[in-house]
Image (spheres, helix red, strand yellow):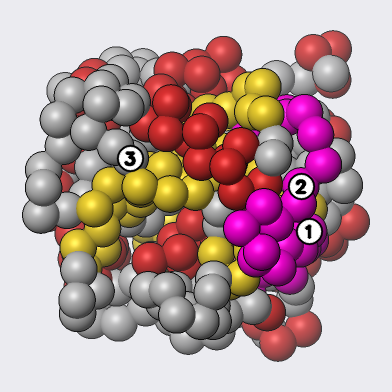
C-alpha cells in the first residue's frame, strides 16, 4: 500500500515482527490505560493518512523502540473487529535492524523465543500473527515414489535442505497395507530428528492401521473434498486445508484452520485441466482470510519473494521440493 487515503472507519496499523539472530521476537506491554491495555503486543502504530505502510512502520519502530529498520517484508494482513473499533493490521517481518530495543514510551520490552509466544497474553487480533511467525516459508507435500527406499531417500534429502514443514500425502494404492505403518512411523521419526512439523493427509483406512498415540506427528491436512464435509476441526493439533476458491477459504477460516494452501497459482503439469488464478487473483482471494496462506501450483523456492509480495506465508510444492536428488543439496 502507498500513501493513499485510507478508510476513516477502520484504524490501519503498521505492525512489526522483529526477529533477532537467536530467533527471538521483540514484544512490548501495552499501557493499562490504552486500548487492550495490559496485554502484550507486537510493536507498531497507526498509519497516518499521508503515509505508506512502510513509512509508518519505520517511523513507529523508531519512536517506540529506537530501532532503525534495514530490511523487512510483508507477513500477513489482518482485519479484525473489536467491540469498540475496527482495525486492519498490516504486519511485516523485520529481519535486520540497527540499534538496541528500548521502551522509549516507558513500555516494558522483551525478546521472546518464537516457540514461546503463546505463553503471553496478546489481543485477539494478534493471534494469527503468532501462527504466521511460527510457520516456515516452505511447505513440502510428498510426491511420487518407486518404493519405500525411494520415499525415504527423497524425504531425507528434502529435510537436509532445511524443510521444516511436511505433509505426508498418500492415496489408496500407493502402498501395500503391511507397508503403511512402517512408512508412516519412519516418516515421523525422520521429521522429528530434523525438528520438522509433520501433518498427515492419508486415507482413513491407512489411518486405522496406525497407533497415533505412539507416533509423533503434529496434525492433519484436509484436501478440498474432505474440507467440505467437515463440521469442526481436529482438536489438539495443527490443522491445514487445501483450497481453490473463496468458498473453500471461508470454510477453512470458519473451521479455524492454522494455515491453508491455495492453488493453482500458475499452470502445472500435474493438473493441466485446472485454470491458473495468477498472483493478482491469489492476493485478492486471501485479503480478508486472516489465516497464513501458502501458494501452490507451478511455484518453487525461487518464487518466495513474489509470494511474499502478494501476501503469502510462503510456497507449498511437490515437485519443486520433493523431486530434487542429493546432487542438488
Circle nearer the N terminus (1, 2): 2
Q: Find residue 262 and report its horizontal and vertical position in percent.
A: 32, 40
Q: Find residue 264 and report its horizontal and vertical position in percent.
A: 29, 29
Q: Which residue is mark 3?
A: 47
Location of residue 40 (image quadrant): bottom right
Q: Judge from the rendering whether residue 184 lies leftward or rightward of residue 13; answer left or right.
A: right
Circle nearer the N terminus (1, 3): 3
User: Measuring 24% from the left and 74% from the top, which residue is drawn there?
Assistant: 82
For the residue labelled by badge 1, is the local secondary structure a helix, a strand or a loop?
strand
Location of residue 298 (image quadrant): top left
Q: Judge from the rendering whether residue 309 lies leftward or rightward of residue 266; answer left or right.
A: right
How busy is the neighbourhood of tag 2: few (under 14 within 10 Å), some, or many (20 plus)? Answer: some
Q: Quadrant of the N terminus?
A: top left
**Residue 106: in magenta span:** yes
Q: Kindly check if marks 1 and 2 are in contact, taking CB atoms under 8 A apart as contact.
A: yes
Q: Find residue 128 and report its horizontal and vertical position in percent.
A: 44, 61
Q: Which residue is mark 1?
A: 111
For the residue labelled by badge 3, is the local secondary structure a helix, a strand or a loop?
loop
Rounded to the nearest angstrom, the CA distance separating label 1 from label 3 is 25 Å
User: Measuring 61% from the left and 58% from the top, which residue is drawn there?
Assistant: 105
| Magenta span | 94-118
Q: Which residue is mark 2?
A: 101
**Residue 230: in magenta span:** no
23 over 324 or under it: above or below = below
Residue placed most toward the observer, 199 or 56:
56
Q: Kindly check if marks 1 and 3 are in contact, taking CB atoms under 8 A apart as contact.
A: no
How busy is the neighbourhood of tag 1: few (under 14 within 10 Å), some, or many (20 plus)? Answer: some
Location of residue 283 (image quadrant): top left
Rounded to the nearest angstrom, the CA distance separating label 1 from label 2 is 9 Å
Amino acid at each position: 500500500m502507498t500513501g493513499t487515503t485510507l478508510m476513516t472507519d477502520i484504524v490501519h496499523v503498521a505492525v512489526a515482527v522483529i526477529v533477532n539472530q537467536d530467533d527471538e521476537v521483540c514484544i512490548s506491554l501495552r499501557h493499562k490505560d490504552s486500548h487492550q491495555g495490559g496485554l502484550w503486543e507486537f510493536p507498531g502504530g497507526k498509519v497516518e493518512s499521508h503515509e505508506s505502510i512502510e513509512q509508518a512502520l519505520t517511523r513507529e519502530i523508531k519512536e517506540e523502540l529506537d530501532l532503525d529498520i534495514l530490511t523487512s517484508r510483508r507477513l500477513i494482513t489482518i482485519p479484525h473487529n473489536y467491540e469498540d473499533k475496527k482495525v486492519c493490521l498490516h504486519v511485516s517481518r523485520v529481519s535486520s535492524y540497527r540499534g538496541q530495543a528500548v521502551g522509549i514510551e516507558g513500555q516494558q520490552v522483551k525478546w521472546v523465543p518464537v516457540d514461546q509466544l503463546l505463553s503471553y497474553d496478546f489481543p485477539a487480533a494478534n493471534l494469527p500473527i503468532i501462527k504466521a511467525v511460527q510457520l516456515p516459508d516452505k511447505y513440502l507435500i510428498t510426491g511420487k515414489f518407486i518404493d519405500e527406499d525411494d520415499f525415504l531417500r527423497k524425504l531425507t534429502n528434502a529435510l537436509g535442505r532445511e524443510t521444516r514443514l511436511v505433509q505426508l500425502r498418500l492415496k489408496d494404492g500407493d502402498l501395500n497395507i503391511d507397508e503403511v505403518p512402517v512408512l508412516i512411523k519412519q516418516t515421523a521419526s525422520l521429521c522429528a530428528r530434523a525438528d520438522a512439523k509433520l501433518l498427515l493427509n492419508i486415507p482413513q483406512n491407512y489411518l486405522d492401521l496406525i497407533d497415533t498415540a505412539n507416533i509423533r506427528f503434529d496434525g492433519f491436512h484436509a484436501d478440498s473434498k474432505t474440507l467440505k464435509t467437515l463440521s469442526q476441526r481436529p482438536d489438539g493439533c495443527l490443522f491445514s486445508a487445501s483450497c481453490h476458491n473463496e468458498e473453500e477459504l471461508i470454510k477453512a477460516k470458519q473451521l479455524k484452520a492454522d494455515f491453508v494452501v491455495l492453488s493453482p497459482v500458475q499452470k502445472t503439469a500435474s493438473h493441466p485441466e485446472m485454470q491458473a488464478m495468477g498472483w493478482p487473483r491469489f492476493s485478492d482471494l486471501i485479503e480478508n482470510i486472516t489465516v497464513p496462506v501458502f501458494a501452490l501450483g507451478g511455484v518453487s523456492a525461487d518464487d518466495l519473494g513474489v509470494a511474499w509480495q502478494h501476501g503469502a506465508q510462503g510456497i507449498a510444492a511437490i515437485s519443486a521440493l520433493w523431486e530434487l536428488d542429493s546432487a542438488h543439496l
